[in-house]
Each structure stands twice: as C-alpha cells, then as structure tokens.
Amino acid sequence: MGMLGLKIDVDTYEGMKQGVPCLLQTLKEFQVKGTFFLSIGPDNSGRAVLQLIKNPLFLQKMMRTNAASLYGWKTALYGTLLPAPMIALSFPDIIKEIIAAGHEVQFHAWDHRRWQDELTTKSQQWIREWFSQGIAAFTRLTGNQPGAFGAPSWLIDDRVLAIVKEYKFDYVSCTRAKAPFIHEIANVLEIPSDLPCFEELNAETDVVIISDLIKDGGIHVLPVHAEVEGGIYNDKFRTILQNAIALGNTVVPLKEIMKKLILKDIPLRLYKMELLPGRHSASAV
C-alpha cells in the first residue's frame, strides 16, 4: 500500500482567492488531506515579464501551458502596472477554512516572484529578512510557527540552507529529488516532490504518466499548484486522485510521510541543481 503526499503550493493572489477554495472542495469530496504551502506576502507576478526577455525557455513554457488561462491577465500585471496585492494575508478566512478542514499549512514564500527570479543576485541579509517577514506574518495569520518550508520554484543555495538550519524546521520540501534525504548543510529532512507537475508534461499523456509513476506502491509526492489544479486542470487532478485511490494509495499531507520515515535509514547528502524536462530553470534535486 503506497502513500501519495499532496504538496499544494499557493503562489498568487488569484490562486489563493479562486484556486484554494476549489481544491478544498475537491479534497473534501475525496475525503483526503494535503499540505498547503502558503505564499504570504506581495504578488509580484507581473515582474515575470523580465523573464520573457532573459529566458527563452520561460517564454516556451508560457506558450505551452497557455499561461493566460492558468493565471489570468490581471495576475500578469501585478507588481508592475497594477499594485502587488498580498496573497495569503488578504484571505484570513480562507486560511481558517484550510485549517478547520484538517489540512496541514506550511510556509512557502514571502515574495514568491522575487525569490524565483532574483535569489541568486540577492545578499544573505535579503534572504534573512525575506524569511523573517514571511514567517512572522505566517505566525500571525495561522497562530502557529511553520514546521516546514518549501522553496519557491525548488530554488535554493547554500546560504538558504544555512538560514533554514536556524529555524529548526521539522522537514523541508525544497527539491525534486527522487527520494527523501537529509540536507548535509542544514541537517534537516527533505521530503521532495518526486512526481512531475502537470504543466511540465504533454497535455495528452500527463495523467497516464503520473498514474503510472505511482503504481509501485511506494511513497510519492505530487506537486500541486492552486492556480493549476485549482483551475483549468481540476478535472485532471480529480482523475489522479481517483487513480491513486484505486491503486491502493493513501493520499496524505507531507507530515504523515515524515512520521513514516525512519531517519537512520535516510541518506545524508548535498543537493545539486538540474534543469528538469519541461522546466524553464534549474531546480534542486
């Protein structure tokens, strides 16, 4: 009997407003729980226009995934022509609904877009302040300190892990590795997203590929995005849940996977950066 962890990233204002309620209803219907990794602060999604110029792979991804339908045109203007609205901070009632439904909530980002686009150019002090702002706001919003961190776009470096170590998280989910490991720098458990995202795959075969990957009865983590599976890909997400349950998998939040792992059997290693198929920039693995 396998376990399928749901790592649900909330990256944008519209994802929080529209996608999360849709996902809450879907998960309720299937009677399963997931882990919501929340972006807390400003939605600067409009700054992604700079990536269209600098990174041809990003443009290809936007065209392949029909980004306008996924994210909406208003999202493409936040932080540039439109003010950047706060993401989770704008919807305390939705956060209460997530918690009341029994889902796990953890920290994903303060400013998701700027981390994704600018982390490598920023100082360690900027990173430290980013964590401080985000975690303080997360704590005010939820009433609890986060027990885990999931890096935006699976982007980390040694400076990030040094700061992560200071927070003494129970686990992190910052990579696309194939199996859990202990981060050598931070000495913390990594529960990776080992399955692909829908938008990384061919739309005609994505459900088949993901379903096939969970047939082995092992432990897997599906990366879910509120803007995607809570939007135009909701039917595909429902099919994945149906298939997973039919295969005998238990669908769980990541904290349940953490409880099942035997830490002494998990390898200690360094992460590395790798450009995965269907992505526009390197992810930690």
Image (cartoon, rainbow, N blue to C red):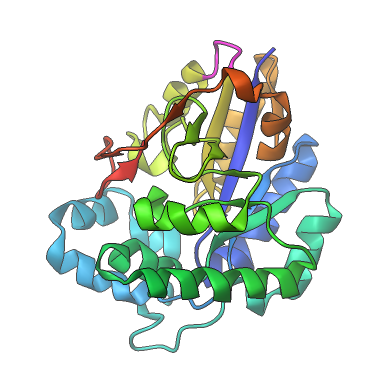
Front residue of this view, candidates 14 and 256: 256
Name the residue: 29% across, 68% down.
Answer: 118
Q: In the figure, residue 108 lies in which quadrant? A: bottom right
Q: How many marks do you count on the picture? A: 0
Which residue is painted at 66% across and 21% down in the image? 262
Q: Quadrant of the N terminus?
A: top right
Q: Position of residue 172 (x, y in %)?
A: 56, 45
Q: Is residue 147 located in the magenta-colored stretch of the structure? A: no
Chief secondary structure of the magenta span? Answer: loop
Of residue 14 and residue 221, the one placed in the foreground of this image is 221
Q: State the residue in front, 251 or 104.
A: 104
Tell me where residue 252 appears, x and y as whole percent. 71, 33
Q: Residue at x 74, y 65 (%)?
A: 95
Residue 174 versus residue 3 in the image, above or below? below
Q: Judge whether residue 45 can be spotted in this image.
A: yes
Quadrant position of the C terminus in the picture: top left
Residue range corresponding to the magenta coloring? 214-218
Q: Quadrant of residue 138?
A: bottom right
Residue sitting at x 63%, y 25%: 263
Q: Position of residue 277 (x, y in %)?
A: 26, 35
Q: Position of residue 49 (x, y in %)?
A: 25, 72
Can the viewer see residue 73 in this picture? no
Taking the image as shown, residue 201 lies to the left or right of residue 31, namely left
Q: Nearer the viewer, residue 275 or 149?
A: 149
**In the picture provided, is 39 more to the left or to the right than 170?**
left
The answer to if 216 sits in the magenta stretch is yes
Q: Is residue 29 above or below residue 44?
A: above
